[in-house]
Image: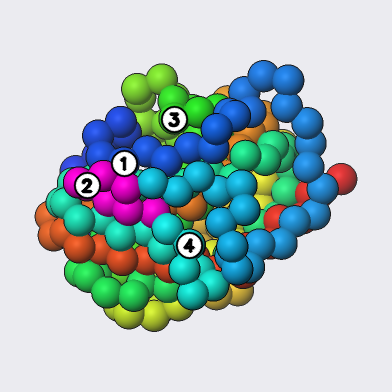
Amino acid sequence: MIPNGKWRRWRVGVGLCVLAAALLACGAQNYGPWTESFDEAGDWKLSADAAATVSVANGALRIHVFELGQVAWASAGRDYSDFRLTVEATQVSGPDDNEYGVLVRMAGDQQFYVFSISGDGYARIARYSDGTWNLLGSDWVESDAIHQGAATNVLEVEARGAMFVFSVNGTQVLQAEDAQLAKGDIGLYAGAFNEADVVIDFDNLEVEPLP
């Protein structure tokens, strides 16, 4: 059963979609190991509108979603296929009925995998492809590994070929198999469901390519 408040699908294209200037769908190169402390904006493209803002300040990438039913994200402008990613995600304020996490193997805003948690302790893996959502497992699985409310969670995604493992705070919470998307950009995102004013900070991002 889907938790109360999470019935609404992510409406890609409605709200703020912050992408790197050069999307890596064609002619992309594979990047090496990478760490990001968000001491400065770097290649992350930051912007704002009435729905949300994405900014870098005080050593973190902050996503603030002002309106209910909206999402915002920033992509890194880097291309990876097989990799292990970790990032610290902190719910600064707002309702616990939210969503935030990592986008991988992005080809613009029309194809990507999304690894999500919520402030009230649920996780999900899904693929978005040309207007269609495909859940890679059950929708919003409850997990004791997730620190709820205004807390920090360490998110880890391992992608190797068609296999994906999603861990939170060192505990595997979900795994999936899907061969639809082979490589692409990396993004960080946050969204609101039935209550607005979600604020999430991301910090200490690390990406390690896998052989």
The three-letter code of the residue at mark 4 reads Val
Q: Amino acid at mark 3?
A: Asp
Residue marked by disc 4: 56
Position in image of residue 211 (x %, y %):
87, 45
Question: Label 4 to label 2, Cα distance in Å?
Answer: 17 Å
Label 4 or label 1, whichever lies nearer to me, is: 4
Judge whether residue 102 can be spotted in this image.
yes
User: Which residue is label 1 attached to?
Assistant: 16
In the displayed structure image, the side of residue 154 where residue 82 appears, left or right: right
Q: Give the number of the mark in front: 1 or 3.
A: 1
Q: Which residues are magenta?
A: 48-54
**Badge nearest the viewer, 2 or 3:** 2
Q: Residues within 10 Å of mark 4 (few under 14, many from 20)?
A: many
Is 24 placed above or below 27 here? below
In 3D space, how far apart are the residues under numbered discs 1 and 2 (Cα atoms)? 6 Å
Q: What residue does disc 2 label?
A: 51
Identify the image quadrant of residue 199. Answer: bottom left
Crowding at dot 1, Cα within 10 Å, few <14 / some 14-19 / many 20+, comes out as many
Give the residue drawn at x 78%, y 42%: 31
Please tell me which residue is depicted at 26% across the width and 63% down the height of the picture: 198
Asked if the residue at tag 3 contacts the one at tag 1, i.e. Cβ–Cβ closer than 8 Å, the answer is no
Residue 51 in magenta stretch: yes
Where residue 21 sits in the image (x, y, percent)? 55, 32
Find disc 3 in the rendering and name its residue: 109
For label 3, count other residues whose C-alpha is less than 10 Å away and answer few (under 14), some (14-19) or many (20+).
some
**Side (left or right) of 11 relative to 105:** left
Q: Amino acid at mark 1?
A: Leu
Q: Residue extending furthest right?
A: 211
Nearer the observer: mark 4 or 3; the answer is 4
Q: At which x and y percent is residue 35?
A: 71, 62
Q: Are marks 4 and 3 in contact (CB under 8 Å)?
A: no
Residue contact between numbered discs 1 and 2, judged by CB atoms under 8 Å: yes
